Image (cartoon, grey):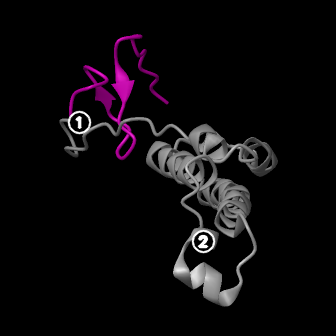
Amino acid sequence: MVVKKVMVSEAICGRCGSILKSPSAACLRCGLWPQPARVAPARKSPLVAAVLAVIPGLGHFYLGHYRKAAAFMGGFILLQFFDFDLDLTVVGALIGAPLELGGLGLWLFSIFDAYRIAKLTNQSA
């Protein structure tokens, strides 16, 4: 059995086992280019995401969904502070919608959605 010393600057081809002159160079024997190392995405806790989503948008911000976080925050601010709610519309008056139905619904959906996204992200990783 012949053992060949490998220098630190050299690498071994993952397909054929030949020695590469540079870790970033293609293999001269089989032509395989080195693949970049895949970094697994950080796992996010669904419980932490749901607890943070008590403030609408904060759970989505924790998960890295910045546009959705801004949409939840903006929607909640419009519904709560500027009173653009279902109870002010003609439809709300006709169906007898309770006050703050839109804000409460958005708030609950924000919590549920942040939990669901964290679970799906961890399953796909």
Specify whether residue 4 is painted magenta.
yes
How much space separates mark 1 and mark 2, taking CA atoms?
Answer: 65 Å
- Which disc is residue 112 wearing? none
Q: Residue at x 55, y 49 (%)?
A: 82
- The residue lying toward the viewer, choosing from 52 and 99, is 99
Would you say the magenta stretch is mainly helix, strand or loop?
Answer: loop
Asked if residue 41 is positioned above or below residue 103 in the image, the reply reads above
Asked if residue 53 is positioned above or below residue 21 in the image, the reply reads below
- The residue lying toward the viewer, choosing from 40 and 74, is 74
User: In which quadrant of the rendered view does residue 4 lie?
Assistant: top left
Residue occupying the far top of the picture:
8
Say which amino acid is labelled 1. Cys
Specify whether residue 22 is painted magenta.
yes
Residue 20 placement (x, y as % from top left)? 28, 26
Q: Label 2's element? A: helix
Residue 46 placement (x, y as % from top left)? 75, 51
Q: Label 1's element? A: loop
Side of 118 relative to 88 (left or right):
right
Q: Label 2 neighbourhood size at 10 Å, few (<14), some (14-19), many (20+)?
A: some
- Which disc is residue 86 wearing? 2
Q: Which residue is mark 1?
A: 27
User: In which quadrant of the rendered view does residue 94 lie?
Assistant: bottom right
Q: Nearer the viewer, mark 1 or mark 2?
A: 2
Say which amino acid is labelled 2. Leu
Q: Residue at x 64, y 61 (%)?
A: 120
Residue occupying the far bottom of the picture:
95
**Which contiguous range is marked in magenta?**
1-27
Residue 49 placement (x, y as % from top left)? 72, 46
Q: Residue at x 23, y 36 (%)?
A: 27
Q: Mark 1 or mark 2: which comes first in sequence? A: 1
Residue 91 placement (x, y as % from top left)? 56, 84
Counting labels gives: 2
